[in-house]
Image: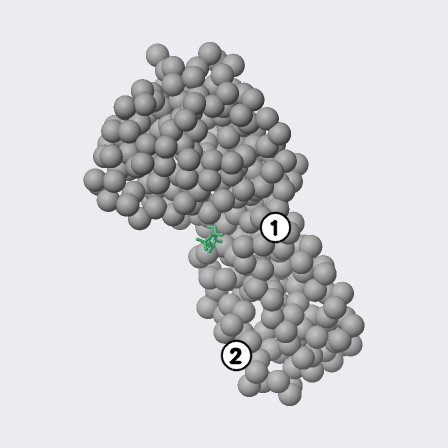
């Protein structure tokens, strides 16, 4: 019977992680279990930084971005020795099961713990939305709204100067954030890792926008696209005269990860957190908790890490139709 459960956050932090931690701790306590928090992700597992947590320890955190447990990128965990040490520390602390909150890299590490026989459950959390097994992950909604607010603001200054802005958003090798920010932000063009960019076409789009008398233009560039902000800027420098607009570029970067979680992310994280505890209660291990077709669902970690989540090409068509 499960009695002691630990939770950790790993990889890039995402707004809503705290709401997920809170839900795991509180749902576990309500089952009469002892709950533990691991500090600094897998790094804390390796150093044995595992501490008991009560419902009070997670009071007043639902509205806070980041993660109260801390996160880290941990190369040591990539080694078998590192993972074995982690399991030794978990066993020493008497932990029966572990909840791991994070994205792709994190769940890959989680799957390795599962393969070594430790009972784990994952929770889908990354602003990139690149995790198979969940249509939407914790943090995406907040990051998207931060990007949108930035785009809206940039439009104001762009209009005053008749400028075009290239706005680069995060997402690693996934274009979800760029695509959605581009559609919702009314961008003239969007560059994506999943679709090759013809910079000539982007330049023509801007030129046409200028000729039609638009006061500003926005290009949303994904950081992982063939033409990110730097590459597009370089291309535009040599095509300056014909664009009409003068061009400026803004890289949003980590700003997108820093916000207070939206209502959507708080509720999604709360649902994921409680479902992770339910999965442990029914002894369903080696799975990721996510949302599929509007419903909370579990998917085997093996499938999660071996399947690429595809970008919705209908949304790409929509973006082209509306630019
Ligand atoms: O995976 C989340 C993410 O923010 C990516 O969008 C980005 O490429 C990466 O993390 C940045 O990593 P770091 O925070 O280690 O600089």
Q: Which residue is mark 2?
A: 234
Look at the image and tell me whether residue 259 can be seen.
yes
Q: Does residue 33 sit above or below 257 in this rendering?
A: above
Along the horizontal axis of the image, is 221 left or right of 109? right
Residue in the picture at 63% in, 42% down: 260
Residue in the picture at 60% in, 70% down: 249
Residue projecting furthest to the left: 81
Q: Quadrant of the N terminus?
A: top left
Task: Quadrant for residue 303, please give it.
Answer: top left
Q: Quadrant of the C terminus?
A: bottom right
Q: Does residue 176 sit above or below 230 in this rendering?
A: above
Could you tell me how far apart the alpha carbons at marks 1 and 2 are, in whole angstroms? 26 Å
Q: Does residue 283 sit above or below 12 in this rendering?
A: above
Under circle 2, the secondary element is helix
Across and down, in percent, residue 97 comes to 36, 24
Marks 1 and 2 in Cβ contact (< 8 Å):
no
């Amino acid at each position: 019977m499960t009695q002691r459960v630990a939770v950790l956050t790993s990889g890039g932090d995402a707004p809503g992680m705290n709401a997920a931690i809170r839900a795991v701790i509180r749902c576990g306590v309500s089952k009469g279990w002892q709950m533990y928090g691991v500090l600094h992700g897998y790094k804390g597992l390796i150093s044995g930084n595992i501490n008991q947590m009560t419902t009070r320890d997670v009071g007043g955190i639902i509205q806070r971005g980041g993660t109260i447990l801390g996160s880290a990128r941990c190369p040591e965990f990539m080694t078998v020795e590192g993972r074995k040490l982690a399991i030794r520390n978990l066993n020493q602390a008497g932990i029966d099961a572990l909840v791991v909150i994070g994205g792709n890299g994190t769940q890959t590490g989680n799957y390795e713990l599962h393969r070594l026989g430790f009972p784990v459950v994952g929770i889908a959390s990354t602003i990139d939305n690149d995790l198979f097994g969940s249509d939407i992950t914790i943090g995406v909604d907040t990051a998207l709204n931060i990007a949108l607010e930035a785009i809206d603001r940039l439009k104001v200054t762009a209009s005053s100067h008749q400028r075009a802005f290239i706005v680069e958003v995060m997402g690693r090798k996934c274009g979800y954030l760029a695509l959605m920010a581009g559609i919702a932000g009314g961008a003239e063009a969007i560059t994506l890792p999943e679709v090759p960019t013809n910079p000539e076409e982007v330049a023509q789009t801007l030129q046409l926008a200028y000729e039609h008398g638009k006061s500003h233009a926005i290009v949303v560039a994904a950081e992982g696209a063939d033409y990110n902000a730097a590459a597009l800027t370089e291309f535009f420098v040599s095509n300056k005269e014909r664009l009409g607009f003068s061009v400026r570029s803004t890289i949003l970067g980590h700003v997108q990860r820093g916000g207070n979680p939206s209502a959507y992310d708080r509720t999604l994280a709360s649902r994921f957190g409680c479902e992770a505890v339910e999965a442990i209660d029914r002894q369903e291990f080696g799975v990721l908790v996510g949302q599929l077709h509007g419903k909370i669902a579990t998917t085997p970690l093996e499938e999660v890490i071996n399947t690429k989540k595809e970008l919705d090409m209908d949304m790409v068509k929509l973006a082209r139709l509306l630019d």
